[in-house]
Each structure stands twice: as structure tokens, then as C-alpha cells.
């Protein structure tokens, strides 16, 4: 999918092009994905189903005793795994999630 980026400042853009561009940008957002990886109180490596733009990853943890989700903090609770192009492919948690907990991720797919 190619997102149009060559709009010229001070000119009138074609509304259909702008609308299509907006729709394509919305399609890049992924919410509530369950990442790949076993939650067994030992594993700390998890993957996403799509390559994503670095630093757009948000990781949430739900536990058996917590109400709702806890957003984990990048660089403290997890570290992103990047490919050779600098795009995200997954993450490593600082501590392994406990059996019974659930990880959920949001991110923006890489525009490749």
C-alpha cells in the first residue's frame, strides 16, 4: 500500500485523494492483537503478526487479579525487537508474564 506523501503546501488537494489517503492510513492501525509467544511464567519473547513502525508499539498486560489492563512502559517493562530496516517485529518483556495473564498489543503497521 502506497501512502501519498507528495502533497504540495499551498495548493488545493483533490478531496478524493485525501479521503483515500486517510482510509489507507486508518488501515495501518492494529488494535488488540494477541502477540505470538507462550505465556508460561518463563518466556519473555513475543512477536507481532505484522511488521510495524518502531515506537508505535503499545503493550498491555491483564492479570488474574487486576481489573482492566495495565499499559507497560517501553524501555522499562519491555524492549522492541527491530529488523534490519528499523521496523518492529516483536518485543521482549523485562519479566515473564505469569501463566494466566494475557498480553495485548496495539501498533501501526509499517508502510512497506
Image (tube, helix red, strand yellow):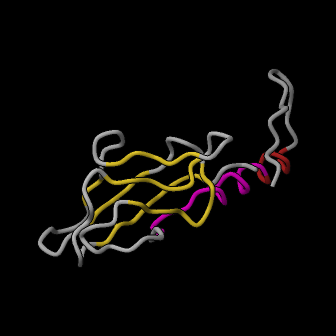
Picture quadrant where residue 43 is located: bottom left
Rendered view: 35 above or below 12? below
Where does residue 42 sit, x and y in percent of width and height? 27, 67
Give whichever of 15, 107 is nearer the camera. 107
Give whichever of 31, 38 is nearer the camera. 38
Residue sitting farthest toward the top: 10
At a point 22% along the width and 70% down the height, the residue shown is 98
Q: Is residue 95 magenta?
A: no
Question: Is residue 98 found left or right of 102 in the rendered image?
Answer: left
Where does residue 55 sit, x and y in percent of width and height? 50, 41
Where does residue 74 sit, x and y in percent of width and height? 36, 42
Rendered view: 13 above or below 25? above
Q: Is residue 30 magenta?
A: yes
Question: Is residue 45 found left or right of 101 in the rendered image?
Answer: right
Residue sitting farthest toward the left: 65
At a point 50% along the width and 56% down the height, the residue shown is 90
Amino acid at each position: 500500500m502506497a501512502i501519498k506523501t507528495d502533497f504540495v503546501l499551498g495548493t488545493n488537494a483533490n478531496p478524493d485523494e485525501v479521503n483515500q489517503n486517510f482510509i489507507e492510513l486508518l488501515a495501518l492501525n492494529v488494535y488488540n492483537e494477541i502477540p505470538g509467544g507462550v505465556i508460561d511464567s518463563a518466556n519473555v519473547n513475543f512477536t507481532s503478526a505484522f511488521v510495524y513502525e518502531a515506537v508505535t508499539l503499545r503493550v498491555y498486560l491483564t492479570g488474574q487479579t487486576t481489573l482492566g489492563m495495565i499499559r507497560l512502559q517501553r524501555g522499562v517493562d519491555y524492549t522492541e525487537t527491530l529488523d534490519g530496516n528499523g521496523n518492529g517485529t516483536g518485543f521482549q518483556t523485562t519479566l515473564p508474564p505469569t501463566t494466566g495473564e494475557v498480553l495485548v498489543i496495539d501498533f501501526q503497521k509499517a508502510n512497506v
